[in-house]
Image (cartoon, helix red, strand yellow):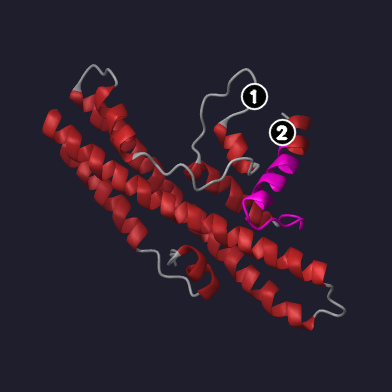
């Protein structure tokens, strides 16, 4: 449902907050692929949570950039504690929760990086075109380059968060198995291996500026 607070107020506050942190902020309109990239990213950076009566969630604050997207990192020990300490009727149910989380993230990888690759290809073309634009103003150049930087920073955040999740799943599985070994542990190990393999299959993107800012970023062919 449209909301003036969410659609108008939060983005303005978020832009000021991001600028204050030294992050790139662009006033350029989002392309369809850039919007898709952001929609997919926030399922990974900040999974949906139960909406409170006051209608603001951590996801809302991250999406609007009121709070930074790279903090806090995925809490590996807290995640493991949630799996192990939450009351369940059986050990198998704990493994089922872990497997569901792993598979949910695994399914997000290819759609996100397919959108990311399209965005980076267009950003590369956008950057190359700047030298040929008639009477390009400094403001126009700054707006274009800020959007490119925004996109690359978001992709870097998502890739790192997927890596954090992989380490968290491995840590949780190891602790769960030594505390409550069950045959379902084999299924969880297979799911985790498939998740790690899917991440590893994303080839390195040839984007020097992106790699310099965020480390190597990978994409699925």
Cα separation between marks 2 and 1: 9 Å
The answer to whether mark 2 and mark 1 are in CB contact below 8 A is: yes
Q: Which residue is drawn at 57% across and 62% down?
A: 152
Label 2: few (<14), some (14–19) or many (≥20) C-alpha neighbours in 10 Å:
some
Please tell me whether residue 62 is drawn above or below residue 201 in the rendered image. above
Q: In the figure, is residue 185 to the left or right of 158?
A: left
Which residue position holds label 2? 6
Q: In the figure, is residue 133 to the left or right of 71?
A: right
Q: Position of residue 203 (x, y in %)?
A: 40, 69
Label 1: few (<14), some (14–19) or many (≥20) C-alpha neighbours in 10 Å:
few
Image quadrant where residue 78 sits: top left
Which residue position holds label 1? 55
Image quadrant where residue 196 sits: bottom left
Q: Position of residue 195 (x, y in %)?
A: 32, 51
Residue 6 in sight here? yes
Q: Residue furthest right?
A: 135
Judge by depth and name the residue closer to the eye, 30 or 138: 138
Judge by depth and name the residue closer to the eye, 208 or 20: 20
Confirm whether the magenta stretch covers residue 205. no
Q: Position of residue 159 (x, y in %)?
A: 44, 55
Q: Which residue is drawn at 75% across and 42% down?
A: 12
Q: Is mark 2 on a helix, strand or loop?
A: helix
Confirm whether the magenta stretch covers residue 20. yes
Q: What element carries label 1?
A: loop
Q: In which quarter of the image is the N terminus?
A: top right
Residue 183 in sight here? no
Q: Earlier in the sequence, mark 2 or mark 1?
A: 2
The magenta region covers 10-30
Judge by depth and name the residue closer to the eye, 131 or 213: 213
Q: Where is residue 49 in the image (x, y as percent from the top left)?
A: 51, 29
């Amino acid at each position: 449902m449209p909301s003036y607070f969410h659609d108008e107020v939060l983005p303005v506050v978020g832009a000021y907050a991001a600028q204050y942190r030294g992050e790139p902020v662009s006033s350029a309109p989002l392309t369809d692929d850039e919007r898709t990239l952001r929609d997919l990213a926030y399922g990974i950076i900040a999974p949906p949570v139960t909406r409170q009566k006051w209608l603001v969630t951590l996801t809302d604050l991250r999406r609007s950039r009121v709070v930074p997207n790279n903090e806090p990192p995925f809490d590996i020990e807290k995640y493991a504690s949630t799996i192990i300490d939450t009351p369940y009727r059986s050990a198998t149910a704990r493994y089922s929760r872990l497997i569901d989380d792993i598979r949910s993230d695994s399914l997000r990888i290819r759609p996100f990086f397919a959108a990311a690759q399209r965005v980076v290809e267009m950003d590369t073309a956008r950057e190359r075109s700047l030298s040929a634009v008639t009477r390009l103003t400094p403001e126009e150049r700054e707006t274009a380059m800020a959007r490119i930087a925004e996109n690359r920073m978001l992709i870097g955040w998502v890739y790192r968060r997927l890596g954090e999740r992989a380490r968290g799943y491995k840590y949780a599985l190891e602790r769960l198995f030594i505390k409550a070994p069950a045959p379902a542990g084999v299924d969880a190990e297979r799911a985790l291996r498939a998740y790690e393999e899917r991440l590893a299959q994303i080839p390195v993107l040839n984007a020097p500026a992106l790699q310099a800012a965020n480390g190597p970023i990978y994409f699925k062919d």
